[in-house]
Amino acid sequence: MASVRQVERKIEKVEGFQVHILHGRDRRDVRSDKTGVTQYSYERALKGSKNVHEWRETRFAKHYPGFEVEVLDAAGHTAHGRTLLTTVRDTYLEE
């Protein structure tokens, strides 16, 4: 089992963008040292033609029930659900 911090880092490494994991009920911040969380199991990024909502539903929600996630662009802003993953990833290249 992993900590929330480890899961967030693994998602960043695989998917190419940062995320912020939240409690599902009230969307409060989950402490990054919380343990007992399943490690992110994907090794390859989801296609850039998919959007943030699709990533949340197919990759995050089914493996982390009870949690919500915000996908962040390079400036730290939450990406809208219809934003393409390639658009989010490109913000990290512009730095």
Image (cartoon, helix red, strand yellow):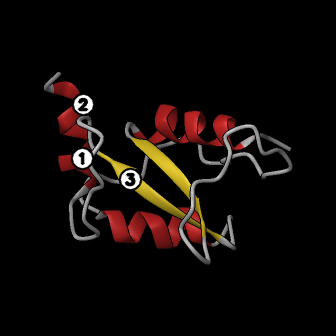
Label 2 – label 1 distance at C-alpha: 7 Å
Gap in Å between the C-alphas at discs 1 and 3?
8 Å
Element assignment for label 2: helix
Residue 64 horizontal/vertical position (percent)? 68, 65
Q: Residue at 69% across / 44% down in the picture?
A: 4
Q: Amino acid at mark 2?
A: Tyr
Amino acid type of disc 1? Val
Look at the numbered disc 1 and give the secondary structure of its residue.
Answer: helix
- Number of numbered discs: 3
Asked which quadrant contains residue 35, the reply is top right
Image position, residue 5 (x, y; %): 65, 36
Q: Which residue shows up at 57% across the image and 54% down it?
A: 29
Instruction: Determine which of the numbered discs, if any, sits on residue 88 in the image.
Output: 1
Residue 56 percent across, percent down from the top left:
46, 66
Q: Residues within 10 Å of mark 3 (few under 14, many from 20)?
A: many
Extreme residue toward the top, this view: 95
Q: Quadrant of the N terminus?
A: top right
Kindly identify which numbered label has been placed on residue 15.
none
Residue at 59%, 36% (x, y): give it. Answer: 10
Q: CA distance from mark 3 to mark 2?
A: 13 Å
Q: Which residue is mark 3?
A: 71
Q: Marks 3 and 1: in contact by CB < 8 Å?
A: yes
Crowding near the residue tagged with mark 1, few <14, some 14–19, many ≥20 C-alpha atoms within 10 Å: many
Ranked by sequence position, the earlier of labels 3 and 2 is 3
Q: Residue at x 24, y 65 (%)?
A: 80
Vertical arrangement, residue 90 with respect to residue 66, above or below: above
**Image quarter for residue 68?**
bottom right
Locate residue 13, reporting x and y percent.
Answer: 50, 31
Q: Which of the two residues, 34 or 7, is positioned nearer the viewer here?
A: 34
Which disc, if any, is residue 92? 2
